[in-house]
Amino acid sequence: MSTRYPFAVIKEKLHAQRGSVADFAIGGRRIPLADELDQWIHANPGLALKAASPDDMASFREAAANYLRVEYKARVTEDQIVPVPSGRVGMSAFIACLLAPGEAVVVTEPGYPAFARMASHRHADVLQVMLDPEKGFAPDLDSLSDAERQRLRVIALNYPNNPTGAVISAETRAVIHAASAHTGAVIFNDAVYGPLTYEENSSCLLTNASGQMQGDDLVELHSLTKLYPLGPQSGSFLVGSAGSMRDIATYSEFAWAPMSALQVRATSWCLADRDGRQKIRNFYRQQLAELRDVLVRLGFEPYPTPSGIYALCRVPESIGGSRVASAAEAATVLMEKFSVAVVPFDVAGYSYLRFCSMFLPEDMQRLLAKAKNIIA
């Protein structure tokens, strides 16, 4: 499989433009760290060269359990949590421990591509199901054949969803758990955008109405990488049944070097920063509102954004007077003719453009200056 990670390619193209492009693909704006955390990191650089101690890891797990209780009203024990250096490392650990070659895994389209690629390298059979925009971007599990269901080992989801911004409904949640129970498949949910939910309480698949874990059929990835710009110092964690987490924790002893004391302690601080998360939510909500207003003025039709940091639009028939037949074509025209970078998604029957709300003020001004010409 030779196709490269699409966001790495986009970053290279943006770098080659040396700031001449209005970046609505990745976004150049970053929320500043809280003064207390910023000062602590600068005062303790040596911790980056020191492996986290057992006490550091225990404090991380305690902070993660408290975070889940505060953010999602989820009651889990610390032996149900495994700290991981990053979200993609967490995905790869889950795949290595719970997915065997030849087994089938469901992934959604459009969706974050990393899980599908890593499952493919595990020699799993990757099955794509569409997210239907007419049904709130719910996954179409009915499209699976009986033969595919019999081989199904993992249902890999990403709710709140990137790039659609969709939050899973109670009805869809019930369908997913019923499919898991019927097939024996484990549900994996990438809940990185869980804290960035705007129209209801923070959202994930972790708990039922009573706040208890749904059982042995669910593993969820959590991270604050979209909220705190810690770069390589930002950690993540997996949560699931004690048995599956024990297996992944044992695997981690072989699979990667210990996390640094700086990474573990900084992430633990962020997990406890409840007031800071509310401020960050308010910031993103304002950024998204401004972005959506401008996109409508330009002639785009953004879908609702109840969560996340992106606005998703159906590809228009033409851009700049040029007819476009795909999201890839539309993104190329926007880049080459208007110096505007976006992320394209072409899936069966649908083509989308994703605009990031982490735009710089000057990039918004560049976009507004082209408003009369983009959609003719």
Image (cartoon, rainbow, N blue to C red):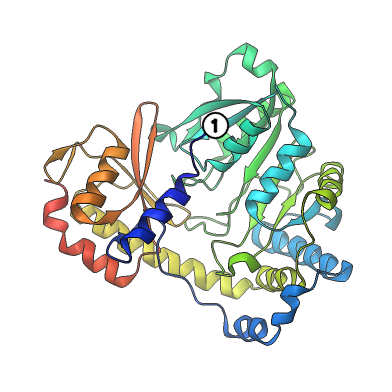
The picture places residue 25, in percent across and down from the top left corner, at 38, 54
The picture places residue 222, in percent across and down from the top left corner, at 66, 54
Q: Is residue 230 above or below residue 339?
A: below
Element type where label 1 sits in the image:
loop
Q: Is residue 20 above or below residue 131?
A: below
Crowdedness of circle 1 by 10 Å Cα count: few (<14), some, many (20+)? few
Front one among 43 and 197 = 43
The residue shown at (54%, 61%) is 226
In which quarter of the view is residue 18 placed? bottom left
What amino acid is labelled 1 in the image? Answer: Met
The residue shown at (31%, 60%) is 17
The residue shown at (65%, 18%) is 149
Tell me the quadrant of the picture where the N terminus can be found.
top right
- Left or right of 225 on screen, residue 316: left
Front one among 58 and 69 = 58
Name the residue tied to disc 1.
Answer: 1
Confirm whether residue 347 shows in the render.
yes
Front one among 256 and 155 = 256
Confirm whether residue 208 shows in the render.
no
Q: Is residue 109 above or below residue 221?
A: above
- Left or right of 226 on screen, residue 363: left
Q: How many marks?
A: 1
